[in-house]
Image (cartoon, rainbow, N blue to C red):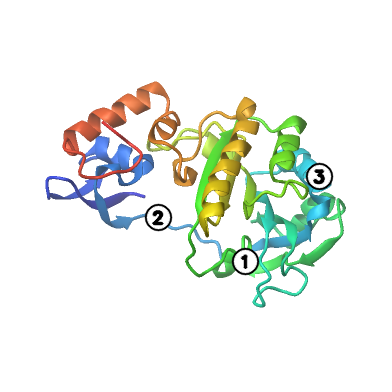
Amino acid sequence: MTRFGIVTADGVVRTVDAGSEPDLFWAVRGGRESFGIVTWMEFGLVEQPRFHGGGIFFDGGDAPRLLHAWREWAPGLGEDTSTSIALLALPPDPALPPELRGRFVVHLRLAHLGAAAEGEALLAPMRAAAVPLLDGVGELPWAAVDAVHSDPTDPMPVWDRGAVLDTLPADAVDAVLTESGPDSSSPLVLVELRLLGGALARPATVPNAVAGRHGAVSLYCLGVPAGPEAAVQVPARAAALLDAVAPWTRGGLVNLAGQAAPDTVAGYWDDDTRLRLAALKRRVDPAGVFGGPVTA
């Protein structure tokens, strides 16, 4: 992002870039809605007409083998490849493929910017780890990038939480499987491990307040709090999952914080960044008109 328009708490419409208002330009890129309402953005584009990727679904009973294979395989990928793996409890929805309806499955996701043959070679170890139920990886136009995660397109109520792990040893994978694996009876409908690192781990060319750059893996989970019982069980089981991986957790991603408490989100930033954000919040929004993850 090179500049943006924002309405701050004093009602002033500002055009912000690195030269005009460097503090606000730094803070909004990472501090989200804490400083005002962004009405437009200007950003650069990267030409990327195609990619090799998509998703592969496996039976949930293969989750231990697949998650342990993924934790060994994913860190060796180059920066032109991205991947995540998720445990999904799918509903018996007739809109889903018959192979997936009402099943607990493992969903392996891949996006590779290199040649198709290279992408296939990279994926071979994961394909060999278990027999797929449905394999949707192939050459795709960039406009079809949503096929990688195949997220629902209709709105739905969710309760979600996230964390960043600075390492993913076998014990951490076992903790995820104990809390959310095929034998856990967890009400969570999604538990995802997403590879971080690469360019995210390097300091931004133009500094920003994005938290979680240090992480190796993002853990994200969500459930549907439909009904009184689920409204209690979903947050409880999400909390139990995050407690189970606490030995390897260091902060989180603000965009995947979900229902984390404000003091938890504040801990995602280092002390210097947190103090600078709070000072700017007091200056541009002293009455706390806007919410967001930054508090004064």
Mark 3 or mark 2: which comes first in sequence?
A: 2
The answer to whether residue 113 is above or below residue 244 is: below
Q: For numbered disc 1, what is the local secondary structure?
A: helix
- Structural distance between the alpha carbons of marks 3 and 2: 41 Å
The answer to whether residue 284 is above or below residue 6 is: above
Badge number at residue 9:
none
Q: Which residue is mark 3?
A: 64
- Structural distance between the alpha carbons of marks 3 and 1: 25 Å
Q: For numbered disc 3, what is the local secondary structure?
A: helix
Judged from this view, the residue extending furthest toward the bottom is 94
Task: Please report the residue visible at 50 percent of the width from the left and 51 percent of the height from the top.
Answer: 159
Counting other residues with Cα less than 10 Å from the Cα at mark 3, is it few (<14), some (14-19), or many (20 or more)? some
Q: Which residue is mark 2?
A: 44
Q: For numbered disc 2, what is the local secondary structure?
A: loop
Q: Which residue is mark 1?
A: 147
- Structural distance between the alpha carbons of marks 2 and 1: 24 Å
Q: Position of residue 48 (x, y in %)?
A: 55, 61
Instruction: Specify whether 60 is left or right of 24.
Output: right
Do the residues bearing badges 3 and 2 touch, measured as CB atoms within 8 Å?
Answer: no
